[in-house]
Amino acid sequence: MELDAKPPVEGGNFRFTILGGIGVTRITVRLSGKVVHDSDCPDPPCHEEMRMPQGVGGAELVVIAKDSTGKVLERKFIVGRTEGQAGGAMSA
């Protein structure tokens, strides 16, 4: 299985596609260890979308997919920060 996604950014939509799953594919997404998305995709490829909350920049996001054959895909991301949320000013 493969995961196609751009890195998540706080306050934005996180879209991803699970490719190559066979049969029903269970998709779980955890943000800082807490389950924020849990669904079954009956007919891969699986197209998923979820909103990243504001203020979660720097947190770990984990996408886990398990298909009917028992094959598991796990991918980790660090949620990007939006401008103004970086926590400091830069000077040249």
Image: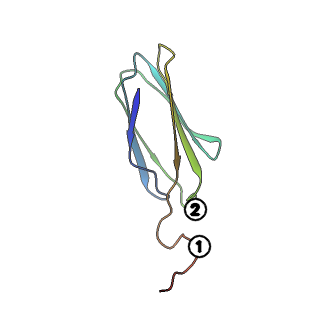
Instruction: Identify the image quadrant of the N terminus.
Output: top left
- Identify which residue is drawn at 51% across, 63% down: 81
Image check: 36 left or right of 40?
A: right
Give the CA separation, mark 1 to mark 2. 11 Å
Upstream in the sequence, badge 1 or badge 2? 2
Q: How is the image coloured?
A: rainbow
Percent position of residue 35, x then y: 61, 39
The nearer-to-camera label among 1 and 2 is 1
Helix or strand or loop: what does disc 2 sit on? loop
Percent position of residue 10, x then y: 50, 58
Percent position of residue 48, x then y: 41, 37
Whether residue 51 is situated above or below residue 18 in the rendered picture: below
Answer whether labels 1 and 2 touch (C-beta < 8 Å): no
Q: Residue furthest bottom?
A: 92
Image check: 5 left or right of 86?
A: left
Whether residue 45 is situated above or below residue 31 in the rendered picture: above
Percent position of residue 17, x then y: 37, 36
Amino acid type shown at disc 1: Gly
Mark 1, other Cα within 10 Å: few <14 / some 14–19 / many ≥20: few
Mark 2, other Cα within 10 Å: few <14 / some 14–19 / many ≥20: some
Kindly identify which numbered label has been placed on residue 55: 2
Kindly identify which numbered label has been placed on residue 24: none
Helix or strand or loop: what does disc 1 sit on? loop
- Identify which residue is drawn at 39% across, 31% down: 2
Q: Residue furthest top?
A: 69
Amino acid type shown at disc 2: Gly
Q: Residue furthest front?
A: 92
Whether residue 87 is situated above or below residue 61 in the rendered picture: below
- Identify which residue is drawn at 54% across, 70% down: 86
Q: In this figure, which residue is indicated by the disc labeled 1?
A: 87
- Compare residues 40 and 75 and report the one nearer the observer: 75
